[in-house]
Image (cartoon, grey):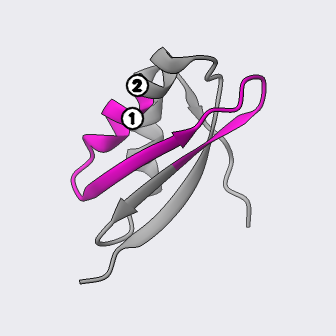
Amino acid sequence: MSTLTTTYGVTGMTCGHCVAAVTEEVGGIAGAETVTVDLVVGGVSQVTVTSAAALDRTLVAAAVDEAGYELAPAVA
């Protein structure tokens, strides 16, 4: 079975605690297999999620919000 990798921008993250909170919340979404975060202090951090199928962006946004941060607008 192949996996899908999707990267989301997240604003407001500044430290390791931020990374841990977002990783835990996004990792709790059904179907999320792995979550990695590239922290960019003062910018848009990159959160990469691997999953068997595409995750609903609203679920990812809600998980990021629950962690205390904001999903950046999608770039077309």
Give yes or no for residue 60 being in the magenta stretch. no
The residue beneath circle 2 is 20
Q: Would you place residue 6 above or below residue 61 in this image?
A: below
Q: Are marks 1 and 2 in contact (CB under 8 Å)?
A: yes
In this view of the protein, which residue sits in the foreground, 68 or 4? 4
- Residue 30 screen position, x and y as percent: 21, 52
- Residue at x 32% of width, y 31% of height: 24
SS at mark 1? helix
User: Above or below — where is 3 with respect to 21?
Assistant: below
Task: Tell me the tag on residue 54.
Answer: none
Closer-to-camera residue (27/57):
27
Q: Residues within 10 Å of mark 2 (few under 14, many from 20)?
A: few
User: Which amino acid, mark 2?
Assistant: Ala
Q: Residue at x 32, y 72 (%)?
A: 53
Which residues are drawn in magenta? Answer: 22-47
User: What is the x, y in percent for residue 21?
Assistant: 40, 23
In which quadrant is the N terminus drawn?
A: bottom left
Residues packed near mark 1 inside 10 Å, few (<14), some (14 to 19) or many (20 plus):
many
Mark 2: secondary structure = helix
Is 73 on the left or on the right of 54, as rendered? right
What residue lies at 41% left-to-right and 72% top-to-bottom?
4
Distance (Cα) linking label 1 and label 2? 5 Å
Which quarter of the rendered picture does the C terminus lie within?
bottom right
For residue 66, what is the image quadrant? Answer: top left
User: Which residue in the rendered view is the most extreme toward the bottom?
Assistant: 1
Q: Residue at x 29, y 54 (%)?
A: 32
Coordinates of residue 31 in the picture (x, y in percent):
24, 59
Please name the amino acid that badge 1 sits on.
Thr
Disc assigned to residue 23: 1
